[in-house]
Image (cartoon, coloured by chain):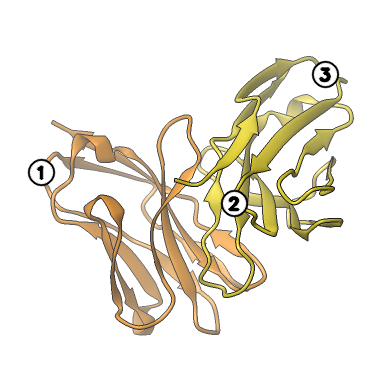
Chain colours: A orange, B yellow
Amino acid sequence: AQSVTQPDIHITVSEGASLELRCNYSYGATPYLFWYVQSPGQGLQLLLKYFSGDTLVQGIKGFEAEFKRSQSSFNLRKPSVHWSDAAEYFCAVNTGNQFYFGTGTSLTVIP
Amino acid sequence: EADIYQTPRYLVIGTGKKITLECSQTMGHDKMYWYQQDPGMELHLIHYSYGVNSTEKGDLSSESTVSRIRTEHFPLTLESARPSHTSQYLCASSESGSHNQPQHFGDGTRLSIL
């Protein structure tokens, strides 16, 4: 069965520090992978997506993600976190029939 | 920015009432979706539509119904609200075609049933 796992429920980082949010997927065919961010009281906003080509994809707000087929992972990274990055982050896979979302990682940024 | 709108943003209402959550998009997307979102949980798909007059139930059993009479409009209706329906409801849309098309989300409706 298709699934997405985000092992970290909550992460706290200091402003200016680097960030990596983990995502593992389970899907037999070529995955179409996405990262979304959700600020309080808002819907999900697309950060970036991967479907083919270069395994390192760039997104908005300085985020990037690396697809590693051998590890079934699609981790999200940012070199220097800003206070405004505090939010909930969701990884998702599109199988063609349906989107599957992870349970999300809540990011807290401390000054 | 995606142009998908949900109303109301917040609703507190008593048990037994009929509720309709509105969702409209101006992007001409064929595909539309309703998700239920609870804290610490993945988004659960409750209904989806691939075009006018096409509606399907998602993975999560729901007592709600949807309709798709126009491309841009995909309302969700609860005939008789119960406290178990308390949740956040997110509407999304996407283009047809390749699987690399992302979903665009509205800001959600937070529903509380007393």
Q: Chain of mark 1?
A: A
Whole-angstrom CA distance, mark 2 to mark 1, is 37 Å
In the rendered image, which quarter is residue B97 located in? Answer: bottom right
Q: Which chain is home to disc 3? A: B
Residue behind mark 2: B27
Residue holding disc 3: B15
Which label's residue is closer to the chain start, 2 or 3?
Answer: 3
Q: Is residue A110 above or below residue B99?
A: above
- Looking at the rendered structure, the secondary structure element under dot 3 is loop
Do labels 2 and 3 touch, CB within 8 Å? no
Distance from Cα at disc 3 to Cα at disc 1? 48 Å
Q: Are marks 3 and 1 in contact (CB under 8 Å)?
A: no
Q: Is residue A20 left or right of residue B79?
A: left
- Image height of B12 relative to B24, above or below: above
Residue count near mark 1 (Cα–Cα under 10 Å), binned few <14, some 14–19, many ≥20: some
Q: Mark 2 against mark 1, which lies toward the viewer?
A: 2
Q: Residues within 10 Å of mark 3 (few under 14, many from 20)?
A: some
Residue at image coords 51%, 71% = B100
Image coords of residue A87 (percent x, y): 35, 39
Which quadrant is the N terminus of chain B positioned in? top left
| Residue B58, percent from left and from top | 75, 56
Q: Quadrant of residue A85?
A: top left
Q: Residue at x 68, y 52 (%)?
A: B33
- CA–CA distance between discs 2 and 3? 35 Å
